[in-house]
């Protein structure tokens, strides 16, 4: 069975692996770090690749659960599966991490950020997490890093069906199919999940439908059409200390993209992505006959990005540009707050990657972004690396920024058109050790970042303002070990120190966090995985008084197994919160207790 190590750009080899498995490791690629496909073992950045096999072994329907094992990241969910889910990368806030879906930006232009309760794992081939400042390549919001979700493309003909049920009304169904005919390929996926919480008015549901069509015009040329829609419905059991027995939220996200790649010369490739993303969020309470809490938000983005890559592997130059138009409409009981308010951003970027000599490399990149009213921003990044047969080291520095959202700029009374972008300067030193023939890898990264011009609500002026600054620094460690061809151990740990300008730790950022995962194949085909996640104590806000308090740390474990039955189907078992612990990732929103899910899966080839 294929396996790859989801660790910072490291590809493990070990005694006992077959030639096919070694080839699988070599094929693991990363797009996010340099803007085009590059072997993971050659990436000079703190990168983690969560492969399709690791997503399948974990068995969770949510992409967010796979991110919990990534060093340098913390995922916090408000209660059940449908609750708002935030991702903190190296202490950066949720709206300071860029989220891409096959190169298309998903962050909301309203107030920034992305709700990780929305994306389901069905139909994905990998998830890439690149930590550090990457505005030099990707523009706004890449202060903490970039997370890119990559969908599967057609690979032969076949189908997969999954049905799962469990405690608390859990229901899950997934169907995917792949069709290939000559140069044409089509991959389609549909998935749904529903469940109930222990409180009144605590149900949730989500579904996604995706098609990914490709036409190969040659070895290096491809035309594509990607369509994806995801929707969710979550009930809200309380606000503060007040029960809300009928309140709910509905969210929908639709993406359409035309990814194109052309070979324009022996060593030159042109990539173009034309995209459109719509986001709709509704807040309702049927018991509120006057509509005091009702609100509707529509946030649309149109984008065009192109990049010309030229040169051999030893010297690769990228020149590109990007245009994006964001528009937001928002209505509430106060009336129309924003009526299709727009902002357009124009960008140009340059990146040069060159081998200085046999064991050293240099990457230099710079990007210019401009939008009215906040002005323009220049974002450079430099990486110097050293390589040997069994280790790789690098040091890098970069500038990154987050542009103010349309809500922060123009929301009635609170908006401030004079806002400047949030800005950071960050550096890191990284080392990856991969002894040949030992089936192990070790990664250590030290990072330091200063962020200024942070946007927050200023009660003195009663509007948004650039009033804060922050320090984020720490250490990330990741170790992986493969025993023969059947068992893999992954361990990750992060020490993080954060402080605002008053010396207080930033909210919901634990000093210590980590994970340990064991994946194994028992017998000939039985797959099993045990994942343990630990998040240490952190500061949070009391949901009733809104005062600053310390939230207790938590340790939780999940077990998954897949047992084939006579080559006809497989039985899948998942146990969440194995020890039945009582804890809350976000204060006021208790996490689910122990839950068992049983499913039936069949693959048609």
Image: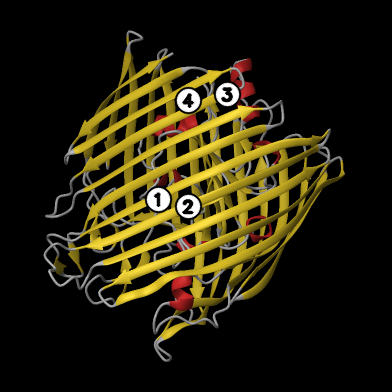
Mark 1 or mark 4, whichever is nearer to me: 1
The quadrant in which residue 508 appears is bottom left
- Quickly name the residue at label 1: 253
The image's mark for residue 184 is 3
Q: CA distance from mark 1 to mark 4?
A: 38 Å
Q: What x and y, as percent, mark residue 65?
A: 39, 44
The residue under the point 60% across, 24% down is 24
Image height of 4 relative to 605, above or below: below
Q: Which mark is residue 277?
A: 2
Q: How many labels sit on residues?
A: 4
The residue indicated by pointer 4 is: 487
For label 2, the crowd category at 10 Å Cα-Cα, with few meaning under 14, some 14 to 19 and many 20 or more, is many
Query: Within the image, what quadrant is residue 480 found in?
Result: top right
Image side of residue 525 versus residue 244, left or right: right
**Residue 68: in sight, yes or no?**
yes
Circle nearer the viewer, 2 or 4:
2
Q: Position of residue 380 (x, y in %)?
A: 72, 63
| Mark linked to residue 525 | none
Q: Nearer the viewer, mark 3 or mark 1?
A: 3
């Amino acid at each position: 069975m294929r396996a790859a190590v989801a660790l910072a750009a490291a590809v493990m080899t070990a005694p006992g692996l077959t030639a096919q498995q070694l080839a699988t490791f070599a094929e693991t690629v990363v797009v996010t770090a340099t803007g085009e496909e590059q072997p993971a073992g050659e990436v000079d950045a703190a990168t983690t690749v969560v492969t399709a096999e690791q997503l399948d072994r974990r068995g969770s329907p949510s992409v967010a659960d796979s991110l919990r094992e990534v060093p340098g990241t913390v995922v916090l969910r408000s209660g059940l599966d449908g609750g708002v889910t935030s991702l903190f990368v190296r202490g950066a806030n949720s709206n300071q991490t860029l989220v891409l879906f096959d190169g298309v930006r998903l962050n909301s232009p309203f107030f920034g950020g992305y709700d990780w309760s929305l994306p389901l794992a069905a139909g994905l081939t990998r998830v890439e997490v690149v930590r550090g400042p990457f505005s030099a390549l990707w523009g706004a919001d890449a202060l903490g890093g970039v997370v890119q979700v990559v969908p599967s493309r057609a690979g032969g003909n076949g189908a997969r069906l999954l049905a799962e049920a469990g405690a608390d009304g859990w229901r899950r169904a997934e169907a995917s199919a792949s069709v290939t005919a000559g140069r044409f390929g089509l991959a389609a996926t549909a998935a749904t999940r529903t469940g109930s919480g222990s409180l009144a008015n605590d149900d949730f549901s989500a579904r996604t439908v995706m098609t990914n069509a490709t036409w190969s015009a040659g070895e290096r040329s491809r035309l594509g059409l990607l369509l994806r829609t995801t929707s969710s419905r979550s009930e809200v059991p309380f606000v503060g200390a007040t029960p809300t027995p009928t309140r709910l939220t509905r969210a929908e996200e639709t993406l359409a993209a035309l990814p194109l790649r052309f070979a324009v010369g022996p060593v030159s490739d042109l990539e173009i992505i034309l995209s459109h993303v719509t986001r709709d969020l509704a807040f309702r309470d049927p018991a509120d006959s006057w509509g005091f809490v009702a609100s509707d938000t529509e946030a649309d983005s149109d984008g065009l990005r192109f990049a010309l890559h030229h040169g051999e592997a030893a010297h690769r130059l990228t020149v590109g540009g990007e245009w994006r138009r964001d528009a937001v409409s928002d209505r509430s009981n106060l009336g129309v707050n924003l009526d299709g308010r727009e902002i357009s951003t124009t960008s140009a970027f340059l990146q040069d990657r060159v081998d200085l000599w046999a064991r050293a490399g240099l990457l230099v990149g710079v990007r210019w972004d401009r939008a009215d009213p906040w002005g323009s921003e220049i974002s450079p990044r430099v990486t110097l690396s050293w390589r040997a047969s069994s280790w790789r080291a690098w040091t890098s520095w970069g500038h990154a920024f987050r542009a103010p959202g349309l809500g922060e700029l123009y929301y009635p009374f609170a908006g401030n058109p004079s806002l400047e972008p949030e800005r950071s300067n960050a550096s890191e030193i990284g080392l990856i050790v991969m002894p040949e023939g030992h089936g192990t890898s070790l990664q250590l990264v030290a990072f330091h970042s200063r962020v200024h011009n942070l946007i927050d609500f200023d009660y003195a002026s009663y509007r948004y303002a650039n009033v804060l600054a922050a320090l984020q620094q720490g250490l990330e460690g990741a170790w992986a070990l493969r025993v023969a061809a059947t068992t893999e151990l992954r361990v990750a740990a992060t020490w993080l120190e954060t402080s605002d300008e008053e010396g207080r730790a930033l909210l919901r950022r634990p000093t210590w966090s980590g994970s340990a995962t064991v994946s194994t194949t028992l017998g000939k085909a039985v797959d099993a995985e045990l994942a343990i996640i630990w998040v240490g104590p952190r500061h949070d806000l009391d949901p009733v008084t809104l005062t600053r308090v310390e939230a207790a740390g938590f340790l939780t474990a999940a077990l998954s197994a897949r047992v084939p039955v006579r080559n006809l189907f497989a039985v899948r078992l998942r146990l969440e919160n194995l020890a039945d612990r009582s804890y809350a990732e976000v204060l006021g929103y208790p996490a689910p207790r122990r839950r068992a899910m049983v499913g039936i899966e069949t693959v048609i080839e």
